[in-house]
Image (tube, helix red, strand yellow):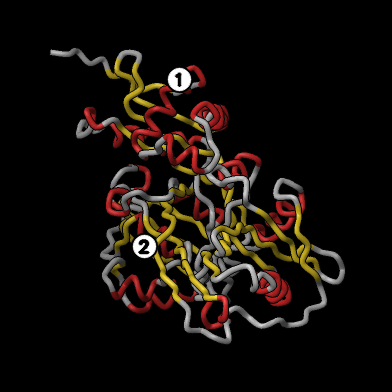
Amino acid sequence: MLKHQLVMKRVTKEHLEQYNKLFRYVFQVTNRELSEVGWANEEIIQEKAPALEHADVIGWFDNDKLVSQVAVYDFKVTIFNKAYKMGGLTSVGTFPEYANRGLMQKLIYQALCNMRDKKQTIAYLYPYSIPYYRKKGWEIISDKISYEIDDYQLPKYKRVNGEVVRVDLEGPEIKRCYERFAKVTHGALLRDELGWSEYFRWDNDDVMAAVYYSEAEEAEGFVIYYIEEEIFYIKEMISMNEDARTGLWNFVSAHFSMISKVKGSTYTDEPLAFLLEDADITETIAPYSMARIVDVVEFIKDYPFKQDTEERSWVFSLYDPMLEWNQGIFRLDIDHEGSGSLTRVAEPSDDSIDIATLTTMLMGYKSPDYLRKIRRIICDEKTIDMLEDSIEQETPYFSDFF
C-alpha cells in the first residue's frame, strides 16, 4: 500500500515544471495545440513563470510531488466606477488519482482566506463547471455574445470626423485606450502588465490592432483582430462613443473584398444585430465569467448604492457555503448619499439570500425583482422595491481570460 504524506504549501518557481505539467494535464493542452499557435513546450513553461511570481499559488504535495493546485492573481476591477481589489482564481486542478479527497475544497477555502487577508473583497473566475462553482458560492455575472456576419451584411460606410489607424499590437496606444474604457466600464478588468500578458497568452503572431482617433486625436476605441481563410476574426472591439463604433466598423467593412464573413464576440447584454441594417445575423449567447463576494462586510463599505432622499435598511439572513464570516443575520444600512454598511445583528429575520445571489444582484447582472420571482431572495415586495431603487442595473463587461 502506497503511503501518502499530503501537505498544503505555497507553490514557487522551483515547482514551475510540475505546475505546468499539472496545468496541461487538467486542461488537456497538447503539444499539437501549442505548436498551432506558435508555442514550444519550453516557452509555455517559462511563460507561466509570472504566475508563480505575481500570484498566490498554493497546492497539495504528496511528498515532493505537486498533485493539486490553485492560483489567485492580484487584479483590480471597476464596479460602478469604483476600483475594487479582485482575486482572479485560475489554474484549478487535481490529478485524477487524488480526486474525491476534499483537496480542492480545502485549497479554495485557503485561497479565499488569503484573498480576505489581502483585502480582495471579490473573486472572479472563468468556470469549467458552473454547477461546481455555484456550490462554492460563485454565480454568473457576465455573458459572451458570439456573432457571425456574412460579407454582404457588413455595415455600409458612414462618414465620421475621426479616422482609424493600424497600430503596433504591443505599443502604448491600445493599452492607453483600454485603460480609459475600463475606468468607466462596470465590471471591467483594470489590466496591468500581468493582465495584458494573460490577455494575449494564447494568440498567434497574426493578431493585429487598429485604433479610432477622434478629430482631436484622442484614442476612443480599438479593434483587435486577425484574418484567416477569408474570415475576419474580431477578438475584441471597444468604443467610447458612437463615432468610434461607426469608424471601427467602417474599417472592418473596408476588408469586404478580402473576406467572406466576420466572426467575433461582444461582452455586453446588447446584441449586435439591432445596430446593423441587415439584422439577420447569427448570434449566440453563453455565460462567460462568475464572481463571488469574499468579505461581504468590507465589500459593502465601498459599494456605491444609489442616492435617495431617505435612509434605507434591510435585515436578512445570509448563507455562504464556504466562508463562516459571511454567515449569519445582518442589517444593511444605506444613507441618503448611497454609502452602505453591514452589521451582524442578533434579531431574527425571515428574509434570506445566499452569497452567490447577493453577488449577482450587487453586480447588476440580475435584478432584485427577478431574483425574488425565481425564489433566490426571500423577502416582501416593499423590500424588493427598496433594493430596486438602491442598486444600479448594468450588466458587467468582462472580456478577459486568465
Callout 2 amino acid:
Val
- Decide: is 74 above or below 293: above
> Quadrant where the N terminus lies?
top left
Quarter occupied by residue 232: bottom right
Disc assigned to residue 15: 1
Binning the other alpha carbons within 10 Å of mark 1 as few (below 14), some (14 to 19) or many (20 upward) gives some
Task: Kindly state the secondary structure of the residue where label 2 is placed.
Answer: strand
Question: Closest to the observer: 31 or 213?
Answer: 31
Residue 369, position as x, y percentages in the image: 37, 76
Callout 1 amino acid:
His
Read off the residue under disc 2: 315
Camera-nearest label, 2 or 1: 1
Task: Kindly state the secondary structure of the residue where label 1 is placed.
Answer: helix
**Gap in Å between the C-alphas at discs 2 and 1?**
48 Å
Binning the other alpha carbons within 10 Å of mark 2 as few (below 14), some (14 to 19) or many (20 upward) gives many
Disc assigned to residue 127: none
Quarter occupied by residue 250: bottom right
Write the residue at 50% across / 76% down: 271
Residue 108, position as x, y percentages in the image: 36, 37
Q: Is residue 206 visible?
A: yes
Write the residue at 81% across / 72% down: 162
Q: Is residue 339 visible?
A: no
Write the residue at 45% across / 20% down: 15
Residue 199, position as x, y percentages in the image: 57, 47
Furthest residue in direction bottom, as rendered: 277
Furthest residue in direction left, as rendered: 1
Contact, mark 2 vs mark 1 (Cβ under 8 Å): no
